């Protein structure tokens, strides 16, 4: 049962297909194009758990009325360096791309800008929203409340927390930007699902069962919980990220989080936040880029442990993948392509020409 | 060789002693009192690796001319929501307490305020500088470049990174504030030194040797490296914290970091940053406090794994310790008290009356 080799699809074609599908799902053309572009961008950078694979569940939510196709995404509170957005239950991509633009403007005026969101929705990989600030030569941090709780507090069994991610982007000079995008658990839940799909066991340290014993079989994932990085430290990080991205904005956190894998109707009231920092107010843009290049090169050239072929910087592998995929197309598994073909048929839209 | 039981010392008396000692070391009375108060506060909250135990090395640095006793701590760049401070090689406590005050004012005016520092110095535990914002009902984040590199990049052996800490404080209502204060390594280096002092072995996962094997003997710590939390994730966190708190401010990072345990003369050019967020610009102060109380109580009351007696919130144990120590005095080990007695003799100051 060897899987068919993945086929390579150009990013533009993928974006156009997602856009058609979302339009068929009820989104206005402009909004469909924005979300389609960002979802294809997620696949382009290798965040394949957050790209076109989410199209079917998004459409399911659109059909079920769980997403507002005509949201009035508006600022409900504002100060010179911050804004709080109400996403009006629109797609998270629309809310957070607007948030990023506002935060950039605020950072330009005030040195830094913070924009929080409530009544948003899943917005794809956190690092997606660092790209616009990075293009402006700015530093950015992104925090989000995950859309399903898979993490109990340290020592506990009730899954009150999500894998609440943190992303940080810092521009470099001739080196790729430093881009960290991490869940606060050892493994993101998507990685557990991928292991199950491939019929592989998980390494010790990813999950434990309800007796606190290592859980290795990913098909038994619902009998256990994810483990936070560094034990109580990762639990603390997941908690404060949730409070900053959720509670502070009046968004869902803890018991209020809606599991978007099982409930396609309830408003998720997703909370996210982006912080943009203008280096011109600090060391200066050119000086920052040069200093980051130096740190990056010192790290890359440093002595390696036996058996280690290369020392990577955060975001560097994704950067290389992105260049490869941009030149040669994004590899999509045959099974996914078949699903997308069926989806096109259901929606009555032109298929992803392949 | 049973160690003598620690003696309890009231926080005011400890602060007054440290103040006398720093004055004898050359600090003006006001500055000595500020630093003395903050150092005693560190011991009060149980951060005993960052309190009075640092007095001797600070005095050694003062005597060696490695600290400026008359610093002109000034803003070198400013925008409405940010400031960059040059600490003029003064004590870090002076620099960062000034930074916190400026960040609070900026947050009040702009919704958020970020203050970075360069040419600062070791400032004690990160969480110390969250207290002032918390007293104002504000949220705060603190980032610092550690003052000695003990962490190689993931897969590497050159110690280019420090345990660069992150601290986050979020006010609650009738519950203690949520206060996270964590190094980005599994164990802080101070914990390794404490294990060595007690003649105990380290658990697996704290350190590895230069072959990548677990290192368990803390007396062999200089033959290995600390491990970051979550492997490559903790390495990424340590790196971005260093870039945000150091590089962005023009402070030391990577190869430039001065090991303050071995070099008492060179300017450390320590970098730190504090971000203050005013919840009045977001959900509102009262609403935030109430929502945080709910999350805290849900977590505390949640189901526990077999054998777990209590689920703790970040900062809760420190909060309880602080109440105990405030009422009954701070327990100081007999050996430390003897050192402080000798120090008082050397400096010709009144001893820590005990």
Image: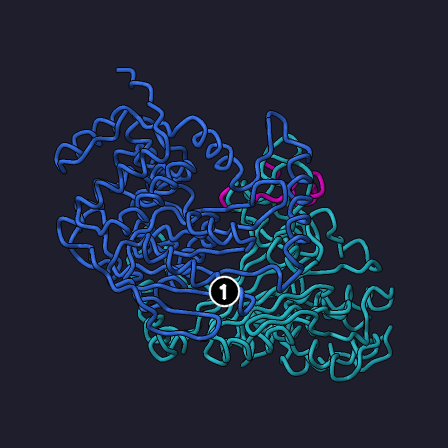
Chain colours: A cyan, B blue
Looking at the rendered image, the quarter that the N terminus of chain B falls into is top left
* Residue A216: in magenta span: yes
The residue sitting at 17% across, 57% down in the picture is B266
- Which residue is nearer to you in this view: B122 or A192? B122
Secondary structure beneath dot 1 equals: strand
User: From what the image shows, is residue A155 above or below residue A298?
Assistant: above
Percent across and percent down for residue A231 are 52, 41
Percent across and percent down for residue B72 are 25, 64
- Which residue is nearer to you in this view: B275 or B280? B280
Percent across and percent down for residue A148 are 70, 52
Q: Is residue A216 visible?
A: no
Find the residue positioned furthest to the front. Answer: B29
Which chain is indicated by disc 1?
A: A
- Left or right: where B55 falls relative to A348: left
Percent across and percent down for residue A174 are 37, 78
- Which residue is nearer to you in this view: A92 or A117? A117
Mark 1 lies on residue: A168
User: From what the image shows, is residue A186 above or below residue B101?
Assistant: above
Count of marks overlaid on the render: 1
The residue sitting at 61% across, 75% down in the picture is A41
* Residue A258: in magenta span: no
Looking at the rendered image, the quarter that the C terminus of chain B falls into is top left
Question: Which region of the structure is painted magenta?
Answer: A214-231
User: From what the image shows, is residue A157 above or below residue A274?
Assistant: above
The residue sitting at 56% across, 45% down in the picture is B178
């Amino acid at each position: 049962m060897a899987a068919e080799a993945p086929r390579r699809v150009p990013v533009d074609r993928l974006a156009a297909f997602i856009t058609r599908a979302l339009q068929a799902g009820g989104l206005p053309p402009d909004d469909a194009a924005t979300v389609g572009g960002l979802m294809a961008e997620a696949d382009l950078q290798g965040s394949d758990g957050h790209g076109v694979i989410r199209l079917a569940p998004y459409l399911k939510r659109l059909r079920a009325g769980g997403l507002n196709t005509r949201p009035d995404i508006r600022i409900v509170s504002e100060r010179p360096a911050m804004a709080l957005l109400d996403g009006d239950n629109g797609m998270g991509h629309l809310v957070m791309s607007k948030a990023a633009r506002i935060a950039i403007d605020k950072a330009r005026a005030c040195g830094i800008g913070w924009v929080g969101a409530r009544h948003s929705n899943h917005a794809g990989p956190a690092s997606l929203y660092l790209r616009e600030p990075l293009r402006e030569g700015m530093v950015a941090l992104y925090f989000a409340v995950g859309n399903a709780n898979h993490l109990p507090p340290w020592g506990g069994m009730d899954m009150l927390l999500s894998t609440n991610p943190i992303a940080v982007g810092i521009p470099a000079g001739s080196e790729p930007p430093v881009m960290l995008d991490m869940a606060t658990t050892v493994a993101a839940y998507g990685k557990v699902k991928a292991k199950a799909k491939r019929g592989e066991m998980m390494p010790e340290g990813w999950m434990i069962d309800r007796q606190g014993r290592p859980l290795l079989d990913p098909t038994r994932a619902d009998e256990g919980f994810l483990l936070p990085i560094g034990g109580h430290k990762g639990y603390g990080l997941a908690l404060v990220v949730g409070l900053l991205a959720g509670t502070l904005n009046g968004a869902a956190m803890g018991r209020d989080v809606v599991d978007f894998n099982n409930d396609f109707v309830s408003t998720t009231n997703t909370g996210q936040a982006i912080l943009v920092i203008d280096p011109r107010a600090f060391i200066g843009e050119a000086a920052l880029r040069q200093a980051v290049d130096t740190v990056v090169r010192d790290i890359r050239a440093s002595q390696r442990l036996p058996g280690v072929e290369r020392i990577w910087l955060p975001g560097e592998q994704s950067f290389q993948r992105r260049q490869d995929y941009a030149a040669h197309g994004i590899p999509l598994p045959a099974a996914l392509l078949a699903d997308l073909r069926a989806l096109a048929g259901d929606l009555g839209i032109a298929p992803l020409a392949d």
